[in-house]
Image: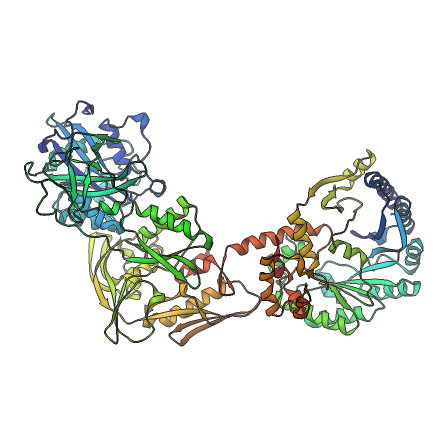
């Protein structure tokens, strides 16, 4: 076994750059990245077998349950090469695996010299992996193509080796074959990391510059900042300074993860580790920012820093209005660990007090909502996600609209909406249905390539608003789950957009308002009023449901008043039973939201998030 | 039949003795009700023994209401006369409908013509209190069918009508037939129209509602039913019978054999019981009293309950002038959504 003990391995702050290899693993959600990472921890001896939990590096429950990694971490692995017999330090930087976290991914990649492109050889490469691969290539990373899960009966390593070779311009036989599950091929992979990936290069004498590639809030230690030292040196005695804010911090601790945090004497050029400064909020220690020292600050920041920019907005409201303060507290707490999450108080006539929240994308939104519900025990109603519209009024005034209820009525000169470049990978049999979907969603085709004989890459530009409106679910259902999607914002375009309001009993329900393309407004109005008619139970009075653009009604449905809601018989033995029945019905009523005088079930708010074809297919089930 | 009747009544009489020991005080019985199953199949002399036993063990007065449920096919005039002689002073006749196809769907086998025969005989014998039960909303019953049944009932010399909307209980044959699509769904809107039709025709004929599903001429209210709705005490005798005593509910074992075994061991045949807490007692009071013409005294409601009800006064579901006089009472429209209103004030 070429593993070496941690105590005897090269120590932090005393490891020559030539001995260091920094790499990450690019993989799709279920392609086995965490299993492979766990296996590397075991083989290099940093985790003893008996301490191994499955997917050691994914810490949060949600991550573990969904099998995805949201926040990256960096692990220092000592390794004696089987090729030259020398001792090396491999820093494995775990990357988030989803489209919403492209920026975080790009920073993780910027901390590395090489990347393992890990592909499940029963499934082939997926769109997000491809996107991250392109990012890695743009960052000039050395790519090691690896086919995983070779132990599976359905594995087709030859087919997918061909595909990978086409993509990165290598030979099919250059693709390594491993099984994270059995460990087969993993030692060879570790040796190849040493051999193929170049060591980091930096100036140890220059003013210190370290790249923040992750920042995590820990309730005991405050913010833990993960850095890669590019130039100079970080020592525990330093006072550090964040380049973007200029704020100075005392260094409380610096160290490496292996795989638990171990304090060290510092970090030198090319090294990866963590630092703790007592900061309580990740927004003061932002991903992409440059850490330098206060006494000898760097003149130039490392390239590529961006403020996280929310792309998707949604209102979050507690079902029980009394839980509003708890929601605020929970959001505050979450924000300590999520620099991309923004929120401000919002009050809705229909839903009461809540928060308008901005997210990086749909997954980010889902994760935040799920964490709020799970960790704070809240029951939430979320409104349909909206994108950011830049509106110019007739009088030249400009507004930024992230909430359909704030969309001005009339007097609009121009509206700009965000546009994304979408890449879809799928088996070629689905070309037709994918193109049909993209066309329906106002897409413009930009190109198409065959990745292999029966797999295609289709590129479209689409309004982001069309993507956030259940595009991914539609894509999945039309391609029996085979298609994968990646998208990135590329700017904004003028759109012919209108706001469709929904009125219950003549009163506008702001939570149901939606900004849609003018050509689709009528269909949207008909579909929403129809859906609400099905979902809202009959009340003791008639409830008209209308869809309107401004003052113009474009669709109308009616919920007739309930005529009868009474049990005829109530005698001796029935009394207890009837009381229990009424009590149960009363409980059901509590899960309704009062909109004016109308009881609206939670499902009605969720329905606003999906299209009709979903509902039709559900009915068929 | 008579031997079965005799043996069973022996057990009932024994249970009455056990009840007397349990209650251990002299109480006045305002109502005796023979119902559940088909008590009109029993020997009148056996029914008489039960009445006498109750009179021996407790106090009966000449105002005590003694009701017998009657299946129209199970009696002739002579038998009715004997029931009258044994002390029965009120009959409740299971008419259900006057339309044969409706009776068939309900699985009631009696000949509708027998209803008028029985009621007329009873009247000739001297019964002053005669009630018929009707059911509306049976699948396949048209509005005209229902009107036929109402008119058939109103043509009889009766003092009281109960009219119930059909409840399709899960697990019944009818529920299965509806599920299989053999019998059409029950339509709540049609039910409502039928209720309104019934109330209108009953009222015109001099029958006034005093509980959601009950109408009476000349204040011939059923004392028995009122005791349920006013939360009074009652004791149910026989297998599966329910009782209520000062906030405690209990019920007898269901199977006749286990009933017999318990009685023969000189034990009350109680299967289980439930003690109602204060909120449950109050919830039941609200749930039951709202169904009566007298409604609920608003003084007994808290602020939240009053607020919740105010909207129903505005919408015409609760009577406006009664509300101002301190009572929450249902209007005709309100009667149709009584459960909805009760849910607003349930504790």
Q: Nearer the viewer, residue B99 or A268?
A: A268
Q: Does residue A240 appear left or right of residue A52 in this picture?
A: left
Q: Does residue A85 appear left or right of residue B129 in this picture?
A: left
Count of picture labels: 0
Q: Is residue A504 visible?
A: yes
When the figure is inspected, residue A134 is found, relative to residue A460, above or below; the finding is above
Q: Is residue A474 visible?
A: no
Q: Nearer the viewer, residue A588 or B109?
A: A588
Residue A7: image quadrant is top left
Residue B320: image quadrant is bottom right
Residue A389 in picture, x, y percent from top left: 27, 65
Q: Does residue A308 appear left or right of residue B167 in this picture?
A: left
Residue A299 in picture, x, y percent from top left: 8, 46
Residue at 81% in and 33% down: B265
Residue B107: image quadrant is bottom right
**Color scheme of the displayed model:** rainbow
Residue A468 in picture, x, y percent from top left: 32, 59
When the figure is inspected, residue B113 is found, relative to residue A249, above or below; the finding is below
Residue B36 in picture, x, y percent from top left: 78, 51
Residue at 28% in and 36% down: A221
When the figure is inspected, residue B28 is found, relative to residue B157, above or below; the finding is above
Q: Image quadrant for the N terminus of chain A?
A: top left
């Amino acid at each position: 076994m070429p593993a070496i003990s941690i105590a005897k391995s090269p120590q932090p702050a005393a490891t020559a750059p030539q001995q260091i290899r920094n790499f990450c693993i690019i993989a799709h959600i279920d392609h086995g990245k965490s299993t492979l990472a766990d296996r590397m921890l075991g083989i290099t001896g940093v985790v003893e077998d008996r301490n191994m939990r499955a997917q050691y590096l994914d810490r949060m429950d949600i991550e573990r349950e969904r099998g995805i990694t949201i926040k990256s971490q960096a692990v220092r692995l000592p390794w004696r090469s089987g090729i030259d017999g020398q001792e090396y330090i491999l820093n494995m930087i775990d990357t988030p695996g989803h489209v919403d976290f492209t920026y975080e991914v790009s920073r993780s990649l910027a901390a590395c010299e090489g990347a393992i492109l890990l592909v499940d050889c029963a499934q082939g490469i997926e769109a997000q992996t491809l996107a991250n691969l392109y990012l890695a290539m743009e960052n000039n990373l050395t790519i090691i193509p690896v086919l995983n899960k070779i132990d599976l009966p359905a594995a087709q390593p030859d087919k997918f080796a061909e595909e990978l070779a086409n993509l990165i311009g290598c030979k099919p036989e250059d693709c390594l074959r491993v099984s994270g599950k059995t460990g087969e091929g993993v030692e060879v992979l570790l040796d190849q990391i040493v051999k193929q990936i170049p060591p980091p290069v930096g100036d140890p004498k220059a003013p210190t510059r370290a790249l923040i590639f992750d920042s995590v809030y820990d309730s005991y230690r405050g913010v833990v900042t993960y850095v890669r030292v590019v130039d100079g040196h970080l020592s525990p005695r330093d006072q550090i300074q964040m380049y973007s804010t200029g704020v100075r911090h005392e260094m409380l601790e610096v160290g490496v993860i292996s795989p638990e945090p171990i304090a060290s004497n510092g970090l030198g050029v090319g090294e990866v580790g963590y630092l703790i400064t007592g900061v309580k909020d990740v927004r003061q220690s932002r991903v992409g920012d440059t850490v330098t020292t206060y006494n000898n600050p760097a003149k130039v920041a490392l390239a590529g820093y961006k403020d996280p920019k929310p792309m998707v907005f949604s209102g979050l409201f507690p079902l029980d209005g009394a839980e509003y303060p708890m929601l605020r507290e929970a959001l505050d707490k979450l924000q300590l660990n999520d620099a991309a999450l923004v929120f401000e108080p919002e009050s809705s006539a229909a839903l009461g007090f809540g928060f308008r929240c901005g997210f990086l994308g749909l997954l980010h939104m889902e994760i935040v909502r799920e964490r709020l519900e799970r960790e704070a025990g809240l029951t939430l109603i979320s409104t349909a996600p909206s994108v950011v519209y830049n509106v110019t009024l007739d009088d030249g005034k400009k507004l930024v609209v992230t909430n359909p209820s704030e969309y001005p009525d009339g007097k609009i000169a121009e509206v700009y909406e965000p546009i994304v470049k979408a890449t879809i990978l799928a088996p070629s049999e689905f070309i037709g249905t994918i193109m049909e979907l993209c066309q329906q969603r106002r897409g413009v085709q930009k190109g198409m390539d065959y990745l292999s004989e029966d797999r295609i890459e289709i590129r479209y530009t689409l309004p982001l608003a069309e993507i956030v409106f259940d595009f991914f679910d539609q894509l999945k259902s039309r391609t029996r789950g085979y298609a994968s999607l990646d998208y990135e914002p590329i700017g904004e375009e003028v759109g012919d957009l209108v706001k469709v309001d929904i009125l219950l009993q003549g009163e506008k329900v702001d939570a149901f308002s939606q900004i849609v393309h003018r050509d689709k407004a009528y269909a949207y109005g008909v579909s929403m009023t129809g859906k609400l008619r099905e979902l809202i139970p009959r009340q003791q009075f008639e409830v008209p449901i209308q869809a309107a653009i401004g003052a113009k009604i474009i669709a109308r449905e009616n919920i007739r008043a309930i005529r009868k809601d009474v049990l005829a018989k109530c005698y001796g033995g029935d009394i207890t039973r009837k009381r229990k029945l009424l009590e149960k019905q009363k409980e059901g009523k509590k899960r309704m939201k009062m909109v004016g005088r109308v009881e609206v079930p939670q499902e009605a708010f969720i329905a606003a998030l999906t299209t009709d074809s979903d509902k039709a297919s559900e009915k068929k089930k | 039949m008579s031997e079965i009747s005799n043996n069973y009544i022996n057990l009932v009489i024994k249970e009455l003795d056990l009840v007397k020991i349990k209650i251990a005080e002299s109480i006045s019985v305002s109502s005796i009700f023979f119902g559940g199953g088909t008590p009109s199949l029993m020997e009148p002399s056996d029914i008489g023994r039960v009445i006498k036993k109750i009179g021996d063990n407790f106090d009966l007065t000449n105002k005590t209401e003694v009701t017998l449920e009657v299946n129209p096919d199970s009696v002739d005039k002579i038998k009715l006369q004997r029931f009258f002689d044994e002390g029965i002073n009120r009959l409740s006749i299971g008419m259900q409908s006057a339309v044969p196809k409706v009776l068939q769907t309900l699985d009631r086998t009696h000949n509708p013509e027998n209803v008028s025969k029985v009621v007329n005989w009873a009247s000739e014998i001297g019964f002053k209190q005669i009630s018929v039960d009707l059911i509306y909303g049976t699948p396949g019953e048209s509005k005209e069918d229902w009107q036929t049944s109402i008119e058939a009932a109103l043509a009889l010399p009766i003092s009281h009508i109960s009219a119930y909307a059909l409840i399709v209980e899960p697990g019944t044959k009818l529920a299965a037939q509806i599920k299989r699509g053999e019998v059409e769904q029950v339509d709540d809107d049609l039910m409502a129209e039928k209720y309104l039709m019934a109330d209108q025709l009953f009222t015109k004929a001099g029958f006034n509602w005093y509980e959601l599903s009950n109408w009476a001429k000349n204040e011939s209210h059923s004392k028995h039913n009122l005791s349920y709705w006013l939360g009074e005490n009652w004791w149910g005798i026989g297998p599966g019978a329910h009782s209520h005593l000062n906030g405690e509910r209990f019920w007898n074992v269901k199977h006749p054999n286990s009933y017999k075994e318990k009685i023969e061991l000189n034990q009350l045949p109680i299967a289980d019981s439930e003690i109602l807490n204060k909120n449950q007692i109050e919830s039941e009071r609200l749930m039951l009293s709202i169904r009566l013409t007298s409604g609920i005294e608003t003084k007994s409601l808290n602020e939240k309950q009053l607020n919740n009800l105010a909207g129903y006064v505005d919408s015409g579901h609760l009577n406006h002038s009664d509300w101002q006089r301190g009572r929450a009472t249902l209007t005709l429209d309100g009667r149709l959504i009584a459960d909805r209103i009760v849910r607003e004030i349930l504790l």
